[in-house]
Image: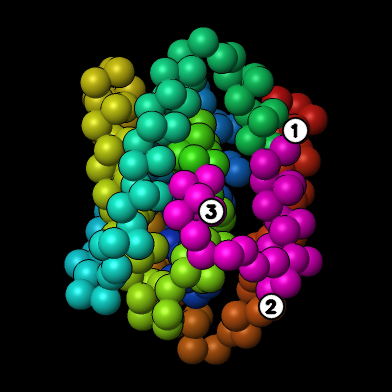
Amino acid sequence: MEIFLLILVCLAGGVIQTTTGFGFSIFAMALLPLFLPNYLTAVTVTCIISFLGTVTLAVKYRKFASFRMLAIPLVSYFVFNTIAVQMMSAVSDTFLKRLLGGLLVVLSVYFIFFSDRIHIRATPVSGAVASAVGGVGGALFNIAGPPMVIYFLSASKDNLEYQANMQVYFTVTAVYTMFLRIITGAVTRQVLVFTGFGTAGMLVGVGVGLVIFKHLSQKSLRQLVYGFMAAMGAFILIVG
């Protein structure tokens, strides 16, 4: 049953990622902790699968990336992600799940009501702060994207540079995060088995998403996803 649910969640996550441009990790982390053996397994599986999708886009858009703009955020991420990964071993699964539930509710409210209204100045300080928040979120929940979306939207000169900066940033940080998880013993045989089945589901979801993308309103889909995310966040927050 675990494998079936894993494939189903990753398939749906692949559809969401393809049709909205992001969201696999957010969707997967709303559900995988509910049925995988423990919270750390869910985070690690999501981390590896989302990396496999990100690296493809990073290679495609790499020539548009601004490596000068990426330097400070990456250093900030490495520092705060390392600290947060070390903290995980001292925190209970129940606390992390409830913290995740609260984060999902906050993110869904932000994306529904404020994502088109909030902008920040693109400075080295704002880049470092956004990446510090992303580093902690990446370690605890494998959700590092939202603060960097806000920063790179403000800092990049056009859509291509924004897309390239995001994908290169996530590829580099995912490699680092996976390295930390390997040396801390989080990548086990069981995790690799789950990852294999989850990746297969995600690839099917990407194919389905490409078909849906041609016929479905992106705005309608995002509202549906964020509403579901809020509901799942509230559920996780309550039941832990």
Label 2 sits on residue: 220
The answer to whether any part of residue 207 appears in the image is no
Badge 2: few (under 14), some or many (20 or more) residues near its Cα, within 10 Å?
Answer: few
From the viewer's perspective, is the residue at label 1 or at label 3 nearer? 3
Q: Position of residue 207 (x, y in %)?
A: 36, 72
Foreground: 183 or 117? 117
Image point (64%, 19%), residue name: 94
Q: Amino acid at mark 3?
A: Ser
The answer to whether residue 185 of the structure is visible from this angle is yes
Q: Residue at x 74, y 66 (%)?
A: 114
Residue 113 falls inside the magenta stretch: yes
Residue lying at 49% horizontally and 89% vertically, measured from the top left: 214
Q: Which residues are magenta?
A: 102-129
Dot placed on the residue nearer the N-terminal end, 1 or 2? 2
Q: Which residue is identified by label 3?
A: 126
Q: Considering only vertical position in the picture, is 32 above or below 9?
A: above
Give yes or no for contact between labels 1 and 2 (Cβ–Cβ under 8 Å): no
User: Of residues 142 and 79, which is closer to you in this image?
Assistant: 79
Mark 3 or mark 2, earlier in chain: 3
